[in-house]
Amino acid sequence: MKKTIKNFLAFVFCAAPGFALGNGLYAADGLSVSGLLDSTLKLGEGGGGGFVYGIEEYANIRLRGRVGESAVFYGAFNCLAASGISAAAMAAEMPAGTALYSAGNQNYAASIELERLYFHIANERTGLDAGLMRLAFGYGNAFSPSDFFNPRNPLYPDARPRAILGGLFSFYPDDDSTLRAFAAAPADPFSIDGGAFRTGLSGERHFKALSVQALYAFESPDGADGEADSPEGVHRFGLSLKGDAFAGLWLDALYSLNPALGSIKRADELSASVGFDYSVAGAHLYLLCEYLFNGAHSVTSGLWKNSNYLYGMARYSVSDFTSLSLSALFCVDDASFTPIASFTSNLFQGFTLTLSAQTPLDRSASSGDSADYGELGPVRSGARFLFAVKAEMRF
């Protein structure tokens, strides 16, 4: 496995650029390589007490090459090596089908994951994207439920949204409007009957102080025998608004209509967030707050167990290169929350150092009764306290 990884990296960094330039495939700009390397150390106390640690080395490598004057090729892959709680989290969160390498005589687990692989062709009025790519919707900041392919988790604000295999056709009637038609393969890559195939339309319009986006998506029945969870398919309706008044304001909502659910409360199929952000003290202090309503059968129900969540963040820029921030995700229903404090400094161009600490809290800390454990508490999160040091290099 180590030999395979080594050969793969050697090919990407040596053979691919030379082949591209030597054969004139990307005559305009050649093949460019960029990316980042994150080195993270975590130390803390486990949810049941006792010392825990985690080490993670993560690289995201991105490739870009022009094809003629109208087309661009994009590719990206992730390399990850981890140990301790970082390795445990990697194994738990890794997408199905991703190979995880770990040997008895090694002190780490590792993986290589294809992240992006698609092309973009465009002219003044139209654009076409197809392949393994990111399809993004909505203006929400912390949650963004209308981004139904990748609803966000504010506990991991730096996480790169996962790609989907599909296509996107864009039409630009004018400089302020965009119409899109999109399609994505089923969530189960081994589905051969087209069940849970997702397709839809979206439109976006920008005014002087307001941006509006609307979308409709249909997910085909996910079982040919009609006995699966959505034998009649699922309809999704999204609306996202972003405006600038005394502060930045936004509303982001997605309603998922699944006839197979029968006579449930219609609000159970709704996921909606509303929030604002504001800069004060000469733009040195940035404030953000966002509320999420999570319906029991909504697009975000897979991320969250309760109905009401509140996220707040304050970031103070000490200088152009250094900032301090304090954020917290609060579950209103069970009074559990996770505050996170961080210090970030750009020590030199392309190198950023971040120190952060988080401590999940809920009523179980004082009562000791398992019935009082909250969703965001230390028992559920696996750690009572966690301190992290992350060095990030961009190239």
Image (tube, rainbow, N blue to C red):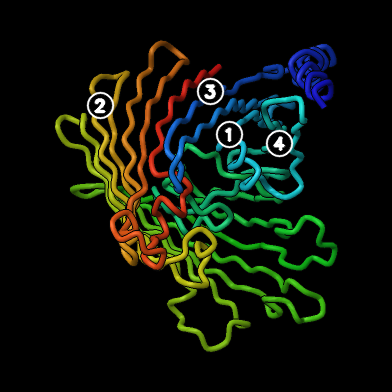
CA gap between label 1 and label 3 equals 14 Å
Residue 288 seen: yes
Please give the residue where the numbered disc 2 appears in the rendered image: 317
In the image, taking residue 220 as reference, residue 393 lies left or right, namely left
Amino acid at the residue labelled 3: Ser
Residue at the disc numbered 1: 84
Mark 1 or mark 2, earlier in chain: 1
Q: Position of residue 350 (x, y in %)?
A: 47, 15
Precedes in sequence: disc 3 or disc 2 = 3
Using the image as rendered, state which of residue 385 and residue 17 is in the foreground: 385
For the residues marked 4 and 2, what is the alpha-carbon distance in whole angstroms?
35 Å
In front of the other: label 1 or label 3? Answer: 1
- Kindly check if marks 1 and 2 are in contact, taking CB atoms under 8 A apart as contact: no
Sequence-wise, the earlier of marks 1 and 3 is: 3
Residue to which mark 4 is pinned? 113
Look at 68% across and 57% down and name the residue there.
183
Spatial distance from mark 1 to mark 2, Cα to Cα? 33 Å
